[in-house]
Image (cartoon, coloured by chain):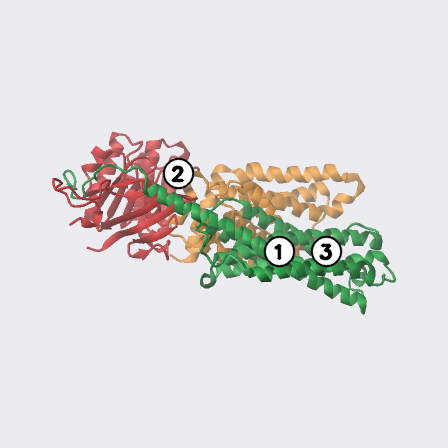
Chain colours: A orange, B green, C red
Amino acid sequence: MNLWREVKLVAGKDLRIEARSKVTLQQIVPFGMIVLLLFAFALDPDRGILRRVAPGLFWVTVLLAALLAVSRSFGIEADNGARDGLRLSGLDGPALFLGKAAALAIELLALEVVLTLVVVLVYGIHLNTWLPLTLATIAATIGVAATGTLYGVLAAGLRVRETLVPVLLLPVVAPVLLGATRAWEAAIDGIPSDAWPWVGLLGVFALLFTAIGMLAFGPLLEEA
Amino acid sequence: MTDPTASKRDDMRLLKPVVSTVLGWASLVAVVVLALFGLWGAPPDEVQSDAQRLMYIHVPAAWIAYLAFGVTALGSALWLWPRTRSSVWDRVAGASAEIGVIFTALTLILGSLWGRPVWGVWWAWDARLVTTAVLFFLYLGYLALRRIPTSPESRAKRCSIAALIAFVDVPIVHFSVNWWRTLHQQGTVFNEQLDAKIHGVMAFTLWFGVLAFTLLYVYLLDRRYRLLALDEDREDREVELAIAERVAAERPVGNVSSAPVGGSAQ
Amino acid sequence: MPHVVRLRAAVCLLGRFPALAGVDLDAATGEIVLLSGPNGAGKTTLLRLLAGLVPLYSGEASVLGVDLAVDRKSARRDLALVGHETFCYDDLTVRENLLFSARAAGRSAAEADAALERLGLTRQADVAHRRLSSGQRRRLAIAVAMSRDPRLLLLDEPHAGLDAEGREVLDAVVRAAPAEGRTVLMASHELEHARAMVTREVAITSGQAGVRHDAAPTPASPQPTSTPENVS
C-alpha cells in the first residue's frame, strides 16, 4: 500500500476519534482561551501592553495547548494495547508519523483559528496582511506538530510521559516561537515584508523535523 | 591470581589506568596554574578591571559545554549507526552529558556574574548566552530521559535520538536568536565587550584555560564512563544469574507427550 | 514440511527478568500447537516474541523464515496475535476498528466484513468499542486478527471470557485453520477443551519448553523423549 494511502488511513483514524470524543474542541480550545484570559489578567489591558505583546502571547498559548494535544494524541494509543496494534499492523514508520502529525497539525490549526479570533476581538489587534501571517502560521504549526509527534513517540510507554514531553519539547521548538512571533509582529504592526525571512526559517524547521520524524518514528515505536 | 568477580570485558574504561592518573594530576595542576595566572599573572582589563578576570573561566567553561555536547551527539550517532553500535558509545554520550550540563551551568552563572558589573544587568539577550541557556535545558531533558529505568538498549535508542535532535536544533536556535538580536541592534554592544581583542599574557591565560579545562573534561569523562560501565556490568551479571536460577527452578516430573493428542484436529 | 516457527535456546528478558530462559520449539505449516503451563511460565512472552514485539536476548528464533535476531518487523505482515488486549480504539465502533486493521494490512473492506460475520459480531458492528463486554471484546480481537488473513495465528488464552456461543465460533476458526493454510499456536488453561482441537501440545514451565525433570528416559515410557523436535 502506498505512503499516501497509509497516511490518510492513520490521520483519518486520529481525526475520527477526535470527532467522536471532541477532546480538542471541548478541552484544549477552552484551555487556550483561558490562558489568553489569564495573560490579560497578568498584563493589565489598560496599559496598552497587551496589544503589543499579543503575537507572543498567542504563540506561547499555542505551544502550551500543543503539549496537551500531543499528550492526547499518544494517550489514545496507550489504551487497549493500541501501540502493540500499530506495531503489528504492518504500517510503516514514516506513514504512521505523517498520519499522526497531520492529524495533530489539523487540530492545532483549528485551535489557532479560534484563538486568533479571541486575540483580534479581545486584545484589540488588527490583522492587515493575510498572506505572510497565514503562511507563517501554517509553517509554525507543521513544525510544532512534527516535533510534538516525534517526542510523543519517544516518550510513549513511559510512565513519566506527560511530564517528560514538555521538558523535551519546549526548548527544541523555541525557534518556532521566536520566528512565528516575529512574523506576526511584522505582519501586524511592522513592515509586512519583514515577515518573509521568518516564514523561511519556520519552513526550514518544519521540513527538517518532518524528515527527522519520518526516520525516527518507526525505531522509537518499537521501543515503546 | 585473577579476581573471579572482575569483568572480562575490555570496554570498561576509556583510558589506561596510568594515563588516567597522569591526566588527573595534570588537570589539577593546570587548573591551579590557571587560577594563579587569572587572578594575578594577567593584568586587569582597562575598561572592566578585575571583573574581566571571570572570562578566564567563563570562556573555557563555555568551550567545554559545547565540546561535551558535541561528544554526546557523536556518541549518539555512533551508537545509532548499526555498524558501529556498541554500548561504549552510549556510555560516552551519557557521561559527556553529565559533565556538559555542569559546565553549561557554570558558563551561565559566570556569564551572569561577569555581566553584572560590566553591563549593569544580570542577564543579556545576546545570541550566545541565550543559545547556551537553551543548551542547558536540552541537557536537562536528555538527562531526565537517561534516568528512566528501562532496558539499556531501549534507553540508548531514545537518548541517542533525543541527543541528535537537540544537536540539530542548537544551530537553528543560535541562528534565529542572532538574527533577532541584530535586527534590534542591541547585540553589538554586548558582542563588542565579549569579543574584546586581547593579547599577550591575557591571551595566553585564556588559551591555557581552554587547555586546562579540556584536560579536566577528558579525565572526568573517563571516570564517569568507568562508573557507567561497572553499573552495566553488574546488571548483566544479575541477568545471567536470574537466567540460571530460572533454569534450575522447580520443573514437573515427566513431560506431556509430543505425539498427537486426543482426537487430533477433527 | 517447512518450519513456520523455529526456536533454539531462546532467551527473552522482561526488564531484567528472564521470562524465557532457553526455549526450543518447532511448528510446521498446518499444525495446531497448544502451549500449556502455569501462570508466569512465559507463554505470553513466547507468543509476543514470535510476533516480534519483544527482542530476543540470546538463542535463535525464526518465524515464517525471518530471523528475529535481525528483523522483527517483516514477519508481522503474515501473522496475527490475539492477546489479552484488543489493540482497538475505544471511541471507534467495532466495524471501524476492523476496517482500520484490515486496511492497514492491505486487505479490503469486504474481508473486514467477512471477519465480522465469521465471529458473529454483525449485530455489534456499530457499537463503540468502549461499550463492548469482555466476551465481545475477545471476539473482536479474534476478528481483528482474522481480518488480516494471517498465515500464523498466535492466540493467547483466547477462550477466556467467552460464552458458549463465542467458544463455538472460536473453535470453528481454529479447526478450520489447517485447511486454510494457517498455523496456530494457542496458549490456554482450558486444557481438556483445547486438547480436543490441537495436533500437539508443548508444556511451558519456568521459561522453558517441555523439559523433563528426570534425565534418562525410563524403559516403561512408550513415548519418545521430551523435545518437540521428535514429532514425526
Residue B14: x, y in percent? 55, 60
Q: Find disc 1 in the rendering and name its residue.
A: B220
The secondary element bearing badge 2 is classed as: loop
**What chain does mark 3 sit on?**
B
Is C13 located above or below residue B199 in the figure? above
Question: Closer to us: mark 2 or mark 3?
Answer: 3
> Quick check: can you spot residue A137?
no
Q: Find disc 3 in the rendering and name its residue.
A: B129
**What chain does mark 2 sit on?**
C
The secondary element bearing badge 1 is classed as: helix
Quadrant of the drawing holding the N terminus of chain B: bottom left
- Residues under numbered marks 2 and 1 in contact, where contact means CB atoms less than 8 Å apart: no
- Among the two numbered marks 3 and 1 on one chain, the one whose residue lies closer to the N terminus: 3
C165 sits to left or right of A23: left
Q: Residue furthest bottom?
A: B200
Is B135 located above or below residue C118 in the figure? below
Say which of A137 and B110 sits in front: B110
Residue type, numbered disc 2: Thr
> Quick check: can you spot residue A140?
yes
Q: CA distance from mark 3 to mark 1?
A: 25 Å
Q: Find disc 2 in the rendering and name its residue.
A: C93
Residue C162: x, y in percent? 29, 32
Residue B35: x, y in percent? 77, 58
A128 sits to left or right of B76: right
A47 sits to left or right of C4: right
The secondary element bearing badge 3 is classed as: helix
Same chain for mark 3 and mark 1? The answer is yes
Q: How many marks?
A: 3
Quadrant of the drawing holding the C terminus of chain B: top left
Same chain for mark 2 and mark 3? The answer is no
Residue B83: x, y in percent? 45, 63
- Answer few, some or many: residues within 10 Å of disc 2's Cα (few below 14, many 20 plus, some between 14 and 19): many
